[in-house]
Amino acid sequence: MLDNLNWWEIVALLLLALLIFGDRLPNVISDGLRMVRNLRNMARNATGDLSRELGTDIQLEDLHPKAFIRKHLLSEEDEAAIRKPLQGVYDNLRADITGVHDELKDVAKAVDLRSDTGRPATATGDAPAPAPRRSYDDAT
């Protein structure tokens, strides 16, 4: 949640909280932590009640519709039958991508070998290598 905040933004938020709540800030923080703890307990109790009512061991992650259908409505044979056509397409695509990756590695090795021999490292070998870029300081 706070991954994209810089340290000065966090300090600014803390100062703003101190200005708004003043000396009540420790009480506000403890109340907020108590509320989060109560919400977690409520969620844990709700999943326990739901598990008892359904007669199965259910986790909070299992309530996602895709996971619920996969776990409770489809048998393993049904899931395999659904995956089988897509698995072939995936395997073919993976093989093609691996082939392209290997060809790119071969081209990179060929370019490296050319540059090691002192010849210009170009794709065709006929055109001269491009001139190095000049910076603004070189022009003055």
Image (cartoon, grey):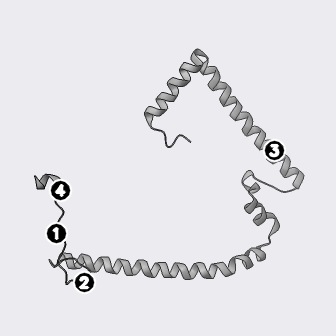
User: Where is mark 3, residue-wise?
Assistant: 46
Decide which of 16, 52 is in the foreground and name it: 16
Decide which of 52, 133 is in the foreground and name it: 133
Q: CA distance from mark 2 to mark 4?
A: 28 Å
Judge whether 30 appears above or below 105 on screen: above
Q: CA distance from mark 1 to mark 2?
A: 17 Å
Q: From the top left corner, tell me how far across and down residue 82 is, in percent.
A: 73, 76
Mark linked to residue 124: 2
User: Where is mark 4, residue-wise?
Assistant: 135
Judge whether 36 appears above or below 127 on screen: above
Decide which of 8, 101 is in the foreground and name it: 8
Secondary structure under tag 4 reads loop
Instruction: Give the number of callouts.
Output: 4
The amino acid pointed to by label 4 is Ser
Q: From the top left corner, tell me how far across and down residue 121 is, in percent.
A: 21, 76
Determine crowd level at label 1: few under 14, some 14-19, many 20+ residues with C-alpha closer than 10 A: few
Corner quadrant of residue 61: bottom right
Residue 42 appears left or right of 34: right
Q: Point out the image quarter for the N terminus.
A: top right
Mark linked to residue 131: 1
Determine crowd level at label 4: few under 14, some 14-19, many 20+ residues with C-alpha closer than 10 A: few
Residue visible at 61% across and 17% down in the picture:
24
